[in-house]
Image (tube, rainbow, N blue to C red):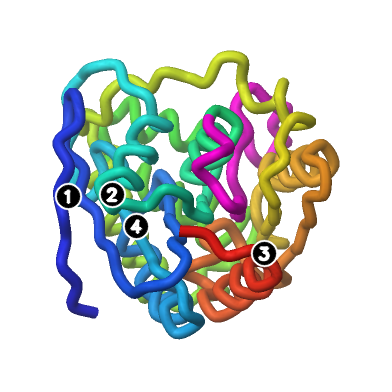
Amino acid sequence: MVTTSHTIDVPGGRLVYEDEGSGPPILLVHSALVNRRSWDDVTPLLLEAGYRVIRHDMRGFGESTAEDVEFSPRDDIRAVLDAAGAGRAAVVGNSMGGMHALDAVVETPDRFAALVWVCGGISGFEVPNTPEEDAIEAEMEAANAAGDADAEAWVDVRLWVDGIGQPPTRVPASLRQAVFETDRLLVRADRVFGRRIPLDPPANDRLATVRTPTLVVLGALDAPSAHASAARLASAVPGARQVTVPDVAHLVGMEAPDRLAELIVEFLAPLPRWS
């Protein structure tokens, strides 16, 4: 896919984004394992459905740069919308991108026509690890302490791509390798992402106030913490709907792009048009 990228100078960094198509805008926010390329297979399907698709590399990811300064991820999301001339957008966020998208909706609901939260987090919501999660976390910490970025990235692949307890053959080797190649650059000790200013009060304390139409998407093979977060969000946000995608783990848009795009389009279709 050949697209034209745009840059935005923000305090302490530079953001790179793409803006394609016409129609109601959808902003796609990627996970902490990858970058905007993770939406490559979802984007054409949304364009075919008549939506405008905006996606960016978060600060410190992909082609976007960061300095070691404090910043608000919500401000960065709004900066992308402002640069693209999108007054309102539906926002789709995966993993950490889902947490930032939810935070932005809570902080400035007038900017968002809808939220699709995909295997994300909820600021201020913590659940205890299972023994399996503790074991994987210990492996990750050991690899990090040893400065072994490759080992740390493969642990991430096992946890988030394969799914806990799943064989490495469950997904195509090309998908595992693609996430590994991206993540190994992100877990390096010298990588700079800036220092994120958390939402205060956090989203978990304000879910009952959310009036933005919300779809909660969960991969059935995702980690227990994601299941707990999905249940919390779906039960606490008025009118929220949850869909669990079978046989899929954390990166739903990379593993099952057709299914995720279908869910997004079905969810957005009945809503009043926005721009």
| Crowd band around label 1 with a 10 angstrom C-alpha radius: few (<14), some (14–19), many (20+) | some
Range covered by the magenta-colored residues: 108-136
Q: Which residue, given by chain and number where applicable, does mark 3 sit on?
A: 271
Q: Are marks 3 and 4 in contact (CB under 8 Å)?
A: no
Q: Which residue, given by chain and number where applicable, does mark 1 sit on?
A: 63
Q: Are marks 1 and 4 in contact (CB under 8 Å)?
A: no
Specify the quadrant that holds the N terminus. Answer: bottom left
Q: Are marks 2 and 1 in contact (CB under 8 Å)?
A: yes
Q: Residue drawn at (58%, 37%), measured in percent from left and top?
A: 109
Q: Position of residue 92 (x, y in %)?
A: 52, 55
Specify the quadrant that holds the C terminus. Answer: bottom left
Q: Quadrant of residue 189?
A: top left
Q: Position of residue 165 (x, y in %)?
A: 65, 57
Q: Which residue, given by chain and number where applicable, does mark 4 sit on?
A: 55
Residues at marks 3 and 1, CA–CA distance in whole angstroms? 33 Å
Residues at marks 3 and 4, CA–CA distance in whole angstroms? 21 Å
| Crowd band around label 3 with a 10 angstrom C-alpha radius: few (<14), some (14–19), many (20+) | few
Callout count: 4
Q: Nearer the viewer, mark 3 or mark 1?
A: 3
Q: Nearer the viewer, mark 4 or mark 2?
A: 4
| Residue 136 visible in the snapshot | no
- In this rendering, position of residue 94 left or right of residue 23: right
Q: Which residue, given by chain and number where applicable, does mark 2 sit on?
A: 57
Query: Which of the marked residues, 3 or 2, is nearer the chain's N terminus?
Result: 2
Q: Which mark is residue 103?
A: none
Residues at marks 4 and 2, CA–CA distance in whole angstroms? 7 Å
Task: Look at the picture and state if 124 lies above or below 228.
Answer: above
Q: Residue drawn at (55%, 39%), measured in percent from left and top?
A: 110
Q: Nearer the viewer, mark 3 or mark 2?
A: 3
Residues at marks 2 and 1, CA–CA distance in whole angstroms? 6 Å
